[in-house]
Amino acid sequence: MAADMTIKCGDVLPYLNDTLTYSDGSAVNLTGASVKFIMRSLTATLPTVNAAATIQSAIAGTVRYAFTSTDTATPGRYQGIWQVVFSGGQQMTWPTVGSLDIQVEENSVTTSAAPLLASLGQVKDYLNITNVDRTRDQKLITMLKAIGPVVEAITGPIVQRPITNEMHDGGSDRITLLHGPVAQVTSVVEYLANVEYRLQQIPAGRPDLGTMWSYMFEKDRSIIRRAPGGGTQVFFGGTDSISVSYIAGLEAVPPNVTEAVCELVRVHFQATQQGRPRPGGGFGSDDDAVNPIMGFFVPNRVRELLVPNRRHPSIA
């Protein structure tokens, strides 16, 4: 269900306008009354907003709240109410049943936001929804955010993200990073007791550049401890004696992953639309046999599309 109002994160417009009425449809006379707007996040224990609202027309029962940038600083879903205190001191709340549904939408173009494996435009095109139809945009974005971790549980990291202070045991001349693909290694620190030694990366294929405190990174996720003269040496022994920070993920989302994401959105979007077939096509075939992964059903077609990027099994 669409929110009663949607506003972008950090914005102060549009205003929240409402007309307060009784159950018979007649307008509330606000002459001499004061009105507050109160808004709380679904997960918060205290209101985000508890401030005076403006009475636009006392006779017509129309009210307005002007958001501040602080009010809309955090994206998410909020509950809102109007709290009226009449001239005689009586208090009444609108709506009298339930609450207003306010959506503060992430402004992903201008602010830092979690990257998606497919764009809203790509998904809408896949579903044959025109760009001018924005009534289901928020629903689709929410699905894209939820589906990302499901896909990456199968493939490993696709969207680039930092992995900080991943710990490894010493005693060997090489270690294998836990997450791949790896775009860049940013630091390798070796510990001997309480002393840390920061290692310097040398280019792959140039072991002759090795020093006493150097390492080489290879694309199979290996970190090799290099030594002077082109040889290797053993990392200091001990549990969690090596700390590695790196960037895992790909520079771009492969087309097969985008296709898989769009298909997975279609399956779950269709299910929430009361079993309606995909616009321009019928229901899925027998290939839509499903297996549960992280609470989502992942059809065979989606899993097959993800095969080229499937993560390698980890060895405990």
Image (cartoon, helix red, strand yellow):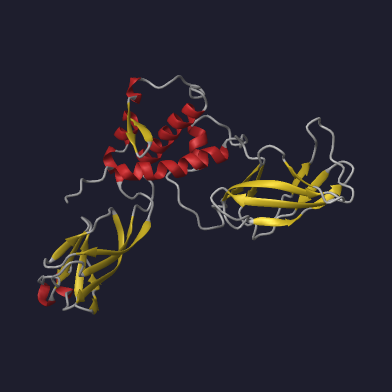
Residue 205 can be seen, yes or no: no
Q: Position of residue 114 (x, y in %)?
A: 46, 52
240 left or right, relative to 159: left
Place residue 202 in its image quadrant. bottom left
Residue 111: x, y in percent?
Answer: 55, 58
Q: Which of the image's four quarters has the N terminus?
A: top right
Residue furthest front as drawn: 89
Taking the image as shown, residue 144 lies to the left or right of residue 248, namely right
Q: Is residue 34 left or right of residue 116?
A: right
**Image quadrant assignment for residue 147:** top left
Question: Which residue is at a point 23% across and 57% down the rendered structure image?
Answer: 219
Camera-nearest residue between 87 and 42? 87
Where residue 5 appears, as percent x and y from the top left, is 67, 43
Name the foreground residue: 190 vs 232.
190
* Residue 90, above or below 186: above
Q: Is residue 78 above or below residue 282?
A: below
For the point 62% across and 51% down, which residue is it?
A: 40
Location of residue 68 (image quadrant): bottom right
**Horizontal and vertical percent position of residue 154:** 30, 42
Q: How many marks?
A: 0
Q: Is residue 211 visible?
A: yes
Given residues 312 and 39, the one toward you in this image is: 39
